[in-house]
């Protein structure tokens, strides 16, 4: 449903993304992994239109989205979270969620329960802990109508219990026909849930395959452990 | 006499409330640091004055003032949409200098530094004019309350808190910033018109910096993103400013003293109560 073809992006001299091509198949959970600075977040930003690629094409179900404004890409069905949480600080939990979708109180409570965020709806986002803010952002991305969900390190900074819960949420999303693209450093999490794993190193796709093939790959181990 | 004095104060408070409220919509609710708000008040004042002096009835000139200011406001928002925070502040402050230059030098339209005297009253009776400005002020409170609590108003606040997040949630932030500025500057233009018809005179000093500072101190004292705050802020600071007349005996230093008091109030607020009296967000 989503395919990148020869996408490149440099920041000054740094080739953050270098002729990157891969595909995210409909109704799968696909994970992007790779060392720090490999270009994972940059790829997310390019897909969601926040960063314009220097070259290459991006197709969402046969529609070229590379030149669309971020809000149009969102409306085309891509929802995402950020590595550095971006909640609306001075707005209540409820209002944060209402920006994503005009939902009723019942739906809002349901979505908050599903991410284990137990706080009064009128609580300001700035009054939440960092982990709770991540959960709020996750809830917001889930509520936002989408066909593809992109999560940038969703397990970072949340407790192990919620990590397990997140797995269940992702599995049920898949069951409901959704597609997920995930950036994640927690290998156990990635290997346990992904259909496809894409390994990125220095902006290039190093390896793509099923989790069990990835863990055995020598190049991947080298990229992670250093030569 | 006291009566006339009170009427005059309440008229100014009503007009200032409209200016500060509309400024709050862009700065407090949408997070656009617009330091050139007074330019739109001035555009409204001049537009209304020129039309009225050419025989256009007030109910058309006041409306035209709002529309013209709003068109300029929307255009400025469109042009500056990529600028953030400090940069937007600098550019909008630059507008003030452009406005001063234009109003001083486009003699055929503005008569330059001489200004435009003889702008007709909307209502002859001062008490009735006070009621009229109060009604428009109340109407703007009502409309801004509705706007800021609407879905559109929530999107303004989302843009203020995190524009990138608003955009990936499918909100056309460019469009909403223009709407915010257009709504705000429409009322700035109306306020300018009310001011011109009240003073029966307008000249380039309307763009003077101390007027801008006064509006900003009122806004910050009342509190960002609070409708109540803006009205109360204008009330208290206007009263404070007027009371200086009675404390300071020498009339020649009243102006300077007032500016000093405002500066001190601003510093005290920033140190002890950065959200002002009713503010919902930090400066
Ligand atoms: N806005 C930017 N300006 C300049 N350089 C950037 C910018 N964004 C990313 N980079 C650079 O691009 C490279 C890839 O960064 P990116 O954030 O995509 O990595 P990542 O794979 O997400 O890393 P991590 O796992 O640490 O989050 C890095 O070298 C980074 O310094
Ligand atoms: Mg990253």
Image: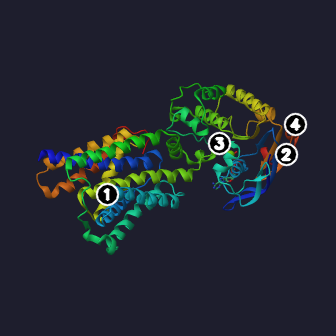
- At 22% from the left and 52% from the top, the residue drawn is B258
Q: Chain of mark 3?
A: A
Q: Position of residue A122 (x, y in %)?
A: 51, 29
Which residue is denoted by mark 2 in the rendering? Answer: A208
Asked if both marks, 2 and 1, belong to the same chain, the answer given is: no
The quadrant in which the C terminus of chain B is found is top left
**Would you call the spot at circle 2 few (<14 residues within 10 Å), some (14-19), or many (20 or more)?**
some
- At 35% from the left and 40% from the top, the residue drawn is B229
Q: Closest to the observer: A38 or A112?
A: A112
Q: Closest to the observer: A118 or B182?
A: B182
Q: Closest to the observer: B93 or A204?
A: B93
Q: Earlier in the sequence, mark 2 or mark 3?
A: 3
Cβ–Cβ under 8 Å for marks 2 and 3? no
Cβ–Cβ under 8 Å for marks 1 and 4? no
Tell me the distance, in whole angstroms, between the alpha carbons under discs 2 and 1.
Answer: 72 Å
What label sits on residue A212 in the rendered view? 4
Asked if both marks, 2 and 4, belong to the same chain, the answer given is: yes
Which residue is denoted by mark 3 in the rendering? Answer: A83
Q: Position of residue B108 (x, y in %)?
A: 33, 75
Asked if both marks, 2 and 3, belong to the same chain, the answer given is: yes
Q: Position of residue A227 (x, y in %)?
A: 81, 49
**Would you call the spot at circle 1 few (<14 residues within 10 Å), some (14-19), or many (20 or more)?**
many
What label sits on residue B58 in the rendered view? 1
Q: Chain of mark 1?
A: B
From the image, state whether disc 2 or disc 1 is nearer to you: 1
Tell me the distance, in whole angstroms, between the alpha carbons under discs 2 and 3.
Answer: 23 Å
């Amino acid at each position: 449903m989503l395919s990148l073809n020869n996408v490149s992006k440099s920041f000054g001299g740094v080739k953050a993304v270098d002729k990157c091509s891969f595909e995210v198949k409909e109704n799968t959970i696909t994970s992007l992994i790779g060392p720090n600075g490999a270009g994972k977040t940059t790829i997310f930003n390019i897909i969601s239109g926040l960063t314009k690629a220097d070259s290459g094409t991006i197709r969402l179900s046969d529609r070229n989205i590379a030149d669309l404004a971020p809000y149009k890409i969102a409306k085309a069905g891509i929802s995402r979270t950020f590595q550095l949480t971006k909640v609306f600080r001075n707005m209540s939990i409820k209002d944060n969620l209402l920006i994503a979708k005009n939902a009723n109180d019942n739906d809002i409570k349901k979505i908050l329960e599903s991410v284990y965020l137990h706080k009064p709806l009128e609580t300001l986002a700035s009054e939440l802990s960092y982990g709770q803010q991540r959960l709020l952002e996750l809830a917001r991305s889930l509520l936002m109508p989408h066909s593809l969900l992109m999560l940038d390190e969703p397990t970072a900074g949340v407790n192990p219990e919620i990590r397990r819960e997140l797995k269940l949420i992702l599995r049920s999303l898949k069951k409901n026909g959704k597609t997920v693209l995930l950036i994640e450093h927690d290998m156990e999490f990635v290997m346990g849930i992904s259909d496809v794993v894409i390994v990125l190193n220095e902006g290039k796709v190093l390896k793509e395959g099923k989790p069990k093939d990835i863990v055995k790959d020598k190049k991947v181990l080298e990229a992670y452990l250093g030569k | 006499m006291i009566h006339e004095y009170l009427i005059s104060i309440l008229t100014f408070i009503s007009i200032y409330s409209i200016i500060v409220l509309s400024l709050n919509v862009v700065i407090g609710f949408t997070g656009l640091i617009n330091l050139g708000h007074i330019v739109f008040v001035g555009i409204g004042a001049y537009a209304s004055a020129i039309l009225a002096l050419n025989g256009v009835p007030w109910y058309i000139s006041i409306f035209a003032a709002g529309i013209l200011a709003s068109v300029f406001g929307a255009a400025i928002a469109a042009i500056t949409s990529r600028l953030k925070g400090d940069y937007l502040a600098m550019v909008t402050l630059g507008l003030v200098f452009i406005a001063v230059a234009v109003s001083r030098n486009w003699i055929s339209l503005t008569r330059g530094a001489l200004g435009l005297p003889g702008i007709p009253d909307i209502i002859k009776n001062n008490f009735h004019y006070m009621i009229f400005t109060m009604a428009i002020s109340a109407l703007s409170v009502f409309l801004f309350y509705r706007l800021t609590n609407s879905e559109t108003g929530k999107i303004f606040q989302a843009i203020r808190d995190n524009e990138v997040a608003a955009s990936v949630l499918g909100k056309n932030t460019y469009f909403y910033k223009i709407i915010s500025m257009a709504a705000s500057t429409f009322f700035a233009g109306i306020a300018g018109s009310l001011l011109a018809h009240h003073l029966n005179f307008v000249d380039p000093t309307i763009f003077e910096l101390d007027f801008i500072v006064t509006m900003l101190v009122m806004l910050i004292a009342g509190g960002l993103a609070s409708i109540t705050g803006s009205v109360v802020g204008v009330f208290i600071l206007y009263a404070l400013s007027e009371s200086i007349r009675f404390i300071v005996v020498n009339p020649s230093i009243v102006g300077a003293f007032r500016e000093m008091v405002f500066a001190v109030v601003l510093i005290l607020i920033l140190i002890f109560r950065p959200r002002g009296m009713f503010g919902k967000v930090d400066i």
